[in-house]
Image (cartoon, helix red, strand yellow):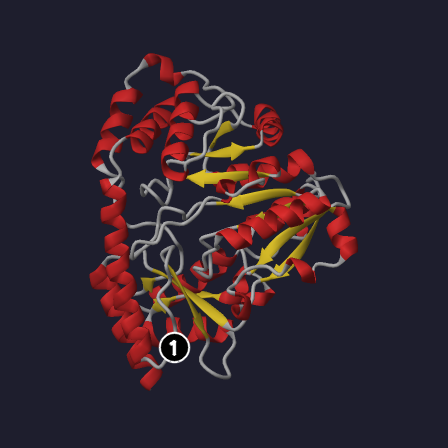
Amino acid sequence: MSKIRISFAERIEKLPPYLFAAIDAKKSEVQARGVDVIDLGVGDPDMPTPAHIVAALQKAAEKRENHRYPSYVGMPSFRQAAADWFAGRFGVDFDPASEVVSLIGSKEGIAHMPLAFVDPGDYVLVPDPGYPVYAIATTFAGGTPWKMPLKAENGFLPDYDAIPAEVAAKAKLLFINYPNNPTGAVADEAFFLKTVEFAARHNIIVCHDAAYTEIAYDGYKPLSFLEVPGAREVGIEFHSLSKTYNMTGWRIGFAIGHPELVAGLGKVKTNIDSGAFQAIQEAAITALSADQQCVREMCEIYRGRRELMVSFLTRAGFTLKSPQATFYLWIDNPAGMTSAEVSSMFLEKAGVVVTPGNGFGAAGEGYFRISLTVPEVRLNEAGERIVKALKV
């Protein structure tokens, strides 16, 4: 029987190796030697989804009507709950019917935005280091990612003045993400106002990935981009329940903002996916509308883990500040070592997985990232191993 010759599409061939797949392969090698590996690489919450949200899912899953195809753009009740939560949290009102769309996790919405608004040859401005999906989704849509270096001396904020005029003129989208993954940096009102001015001047759509606005410490309350004057005329914001309520596997979120941007994203979704399971949407309503004490308690746990790991890293000779938000630590490499070498050293010498900064883009070289999403007892063990490895 003859066989067909199979070749991947060019867009697939162009993809870089997926960061965490390479890390997992190396991790498996070390584990095969009998090493107890502690994974501080992936930002996947280890704490369970709060019980009242799980109970809401159980109840909603028993409803026959929830077993049918859901709405592509989300149940009206879920979009209302999202709009109400946003108004309560950020003080800005949006129409749930035209300015909110449900997402199968915010990653889905981010990945679909270029399909809605980018044509071949268009530029999309993406942060470097940054979430890989911004650039990959752009490439899939035929656009060209233009990397904006995030530098320590600029607070890990992009420098819009450094973007060439010819690039800005051909740019369709601008992705920003604060509080930031992977750096843990935060943005203030002045930066968001500058973003609005830059976008309006060059007719660029702002896409703000706001997945970490609720993971914050020491009284700090991250802003929404849409809080600042003029933002709702140029942008859309992506929110996820994954990190806020430990619901990464549930795949539920929403986008909120300019009605034409929401409509464009909704048109892509209508043709590509069938919406989020309605029982999950009902549970998400409970998450958004119930008392947020569970979130406050979770942040306090992360705060304790942050202090613990900063203490260990300081003992190991690193100099770093405690981040105000996210559950990541972004740390300078030891002198003379590349990010890949640091990651390999910690895995081989300490049995600890950390993420090399260059996995998030070329500008991430010189750093490594630690995620605080493991129980304190394991984090304590990881810290002890790191200190020991650097003293050997």
Relative height, residue 239 to residue 194 (above, below): above
Q: Nearer the viewer, residue 17 or 153?
A: 153
Image height of 372 relative to 255, above or below: below
Quarter holding the C terminus is bottom left
Q: Nearer the viewer, residue 12 or 380?
A: 380
Q: Which residue is mark 1?
A: 319
Residue 128: image location, x then y, percent: 58, 60
Quadrant into which the N terminus falls: top right
Residue closest to the far top: 65
Query: Which x, y percent locates residue 17?
Result: 57, 57
Task: Let me know if residue 47 appears in the view.
Answer: no
Q: Is residue 313 above or below residue 163?
A: below
Is 95 left or right of 127, judged from the image as shown? left
Residue 346 in sight in this render: yes
Q: In front: 363, or 201?
A: 201
Q: Amino acid at mark 1?
A: Thr
